[in-house]
Amino acid sequence: MCTQIDSGVVCESMTDQKRIVLKPIGYVRTKAVGDEVKDKGRTSQIVIDSEFSEAIEGIDGFSHIFVLFWLNQVFAQSKMLKVHPRGREDLPLLGVFATRTNLRPNPLGLTLVELLGVNGNVLVVRGLDAFDETPVLDLKPFDFWDMAENARVPEWWTKLNREKSGRS
């Protein structure tokens, strides 16, 4: 069970009383609302807390970064373990770990974004699918180690990708 507190997020396991405390390094600033956050062309900002400003030195040398964030606006159905991808019932019912749903046991978001610029403690990015005031937990630069040769995806994903690109 996870609880949001002023200084971060506290997660406790009821079985063995292990505790994880996550402290955001900053937050998202965006004008996007609702489904607008899914627009990969939209720009937004990541405001880094001043105590972590030294940690972003050199990040401007990368064109893309991974952003790990807390899905603080996802509350309902967090115990759901199976979903239809994209909520489409014509696609198979799958475990949440086999999909990109935001309905997860631990509401973490991970997105690869284009880094457009750094102005002091503010990163300007394109393609971040997070809401305004979303807590940012970590940043990692994209590099060629992150590429996978011979990656495969299931047929349902290929179907979605064809539909998205307008090919049937």
Image (cartoon, grey):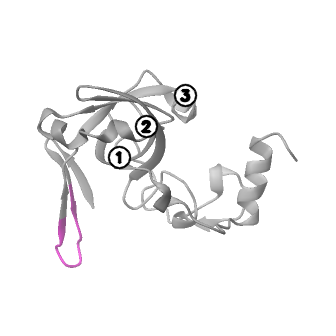
Q: Main secondary structure of the magenta part?
A: loop
Residue extent of the magenta highlight: 10-19
- Mark 2 sits on what residue? 130
Q: Is residue 96 left or right of residue 119?
A: right
Q: Quadrant of residue 59?
A: top left
- Mark 3 sits on what residue? 36
Q: Is residue 47 left or right of residue 44?
A: left
Of mark 3 and mark 1, the one earlier in the sequence is: 3
**Viewer can see residue 106:** yes
- Tell me residue 116's x, y (percent): 44, 29
- Tell me the crowding category of disc 3: few under 14, some 14 to 19, or many 20 or more residues within 10 angstroms, Cα based: some
**Viewer can see residue 90:** no
- Tell me the crowding category of disc 2: few under 14, some 14 to 19, or many 20 or more residues within 10 angstroms, Cα based: many
CA separation, marks 2 and 1? 8 Å
Q: Residue at x 79, y 49 (%)?
A: 162
Residue 69's tag is 1
